[in-house]
Image: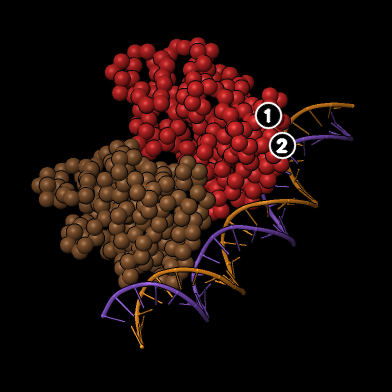
Chain colours: A red, B brown, C purple, D orange
Amino acid sequence: MNILLIEDDEVLADGLTHTLSNSGYHVTGATTAAYAEHLLKAQGFDLIILDLGLPDMGGLQLLRRLRSQKYSLPIMILTAHDDMNDRIEGISQGADDYMTKPFELRELEARLHALIRRCYGGFSHIIEIGGLQLDTSNQQILAKGELLSLSAREFAVLEILMMQNDKVISKDKIAKHLSLHGDALADNAIEVYIHRIRKRIKPYGVGIRTFRGLGYLLENKVDE
Amino acid sequence: MNILLIEDDEVLADGLTHTLSNSGYHVTGATTAAYAEHLLKAQGFDLIILDLGLPDMGGLQLLRRLRSQKYSLPIMILTAHDDMNDRIEGISQGADDYMTKPFELRELEARLHALIRRCYGGFSHIIEIGGLQLDTSNQQILAKGELLSLSAREFAVLEILMMQNDKVISKDKIAKHLSLHGDALADNAIEVYIHRIRKRIKPYGVGIRTFRGLGYLLENKVDE
DNA sequence: TTTAAGTTGAAAGGTTATTGAAAGTTTTGA
DNA sequence: TCAAAACTTTCAATAACCTTTCAACTTAAA
């Protein structure tokens, strides 16, 4: 799970990054709206935490732009208490949530989990396909109850396939989800990971179907 | 879904292209009216986004020419706020829609979806014929709930037949829909694809009817 | 610090599905 | 009945994908 944290307060950013990393999320920080936008184009994120009180006031503009460019990923907004009044009403709609500063990290994390659940997992924080379970709050994949030990990259690939359930995921999307510095990954590398994951998940009745020229789809191979 | 974007502002064009590509559309850009017209002759588009404020003021002329010729495809018009007054009234009729700059991409996209729906589909983003469902937002075709695995070309042919529902589609149109670089495709190749698709969709109670000398029509074969 | 073990992705070769031309057959309508 | 149009099958070239191997790199252990 890749989180983009757009926050100029270094202390707060550090704390958040530390906390969320501990929960297994991968956090990328941006201190300005401009840089955040740059990152968004280059990489694949699953969630954004956006502080509206950026120095250049680009926060709100960025938010509007994000909303408009059907980046359909969930956005958690942070805002100072006295700025909040009329803004929030218009802002907090759809899948988003917001918190007013100061807040407790604990609560933020709980709300983040809820947000992720709503957007990706339906009811629960566990996304289940066949014998596999993606635990979105602990960032683990369980196979029949046992923890599946995957490398970081393998995990990331399987994760995006599980999160975007029932959708064909292109190699391009996978590459963006993996590459954390915009340096594209050759198609072949993706194929290698698909191959490795296939070997790993085969025993659990889950398979990856190829859509030639389009991408890959995770599917349950045993009838329920 | 092929969209022709006629826009000279590079930044705006980039943003639009990026957004729409993410939604699964295929966007081709043109910065002048003349080039746009050239593209229109060579390729098959399903929708045009036209900025009237082109530098040479060819936008309006192009629009008139499109109207007078029987390009019946929907046109989304972009116009600067102060240019809009008396012009738009005469312009926005039929299947078209327009937006005044500045606008939010999000709203534009929503309107685009609405336009596409109005012109090609019913209410939802799923166009349904017999047992087949074209999911325009995920670019997938479902047959009785199952994802139909078609090759890229087969998908494109079936897509245009489903989108132009209840209309006879000529081979020429299909060829243009496929070839995104003007290199024509022999009639026979189309026939081959029609043949392949017929075999694929037969089990789902959907057929392709031939109109000799005119083209093909997708139809539901089971009475409802 | 050194060693060991695991991870990563480029390279290369093998495999399979897709594509569209070719050519023969069938259908259609004048 | 005849020619044009459409249907169908076959097939070689190609593009996409799979698989294995290996060297560089990272991380963990000794």
Which residue is depicted at the point 39% across and 65% down?
Answer: B175
Image location of residue A41, percent across then percent down: 47, 41
In this view, B15 is above or below A130: below
Q: Nearer the viewer, residue B42 or B121?
A: B121
Which residue is depicted at the point 18% across and 50% down?
Answer: B94
| Residue indicated by mark 2 | A203
Q: CA distance from mark 1 to mark 2?
A: 9 Å
Image location of residue C7, percent across then percent down: 72, 37
Q: Residues within 10 Å of mark 2 (few under 14, many from 20)?
A: few
In this view, D29 is above or below B31: above
Local SS, label 1: strand
Image location of residue A183, percent across then percent down: 57, 45
Which residue is depicted at the point 53% across and 36% down?
Answer: A165
Whichever of labels 1 and 2 marks the residue nearer the N terminus, that label is 1
Dot 1 and dot 2 residues touching (CB under 8 Å): yes
Q: Nearer the viewer, residue B48 or A125?
A: A125
The amino acid at mark 2 is: Pro
Q: Residues within 10 Å of mark 1 (few under 14, many from 20)?
A: some
| Residue indicated by mark 1 | A143
Q: Is residue C12 left or right of residue B132?
A: right
Q: Is residue A36 left or right of residue A182?
A: left
The amino acid at mark 1 is: Ala
Q: Is residue A3 left or right of residue B38?
A: right
In the rendered image, the quadrant that contains the C terminus of chain B is top left
Using the rendered image of the protein, determine whether residue B81 is visible from the camera's viewpoint: yes
Question: What is the chain identity of the residue bearing mark 1?
Answer: A
Local SS, label 2: helix
Question: What is the chain identity of the residue bearing mark 2?
Answer: A
Which residue is depicted at the point 42% across and 58% down?
Answer: B157
**Quadrant of res A74:** top left
Q: Nearer the viewer, residue A122 or A81?
A: A122
In this view, B2 is above or below A66: below
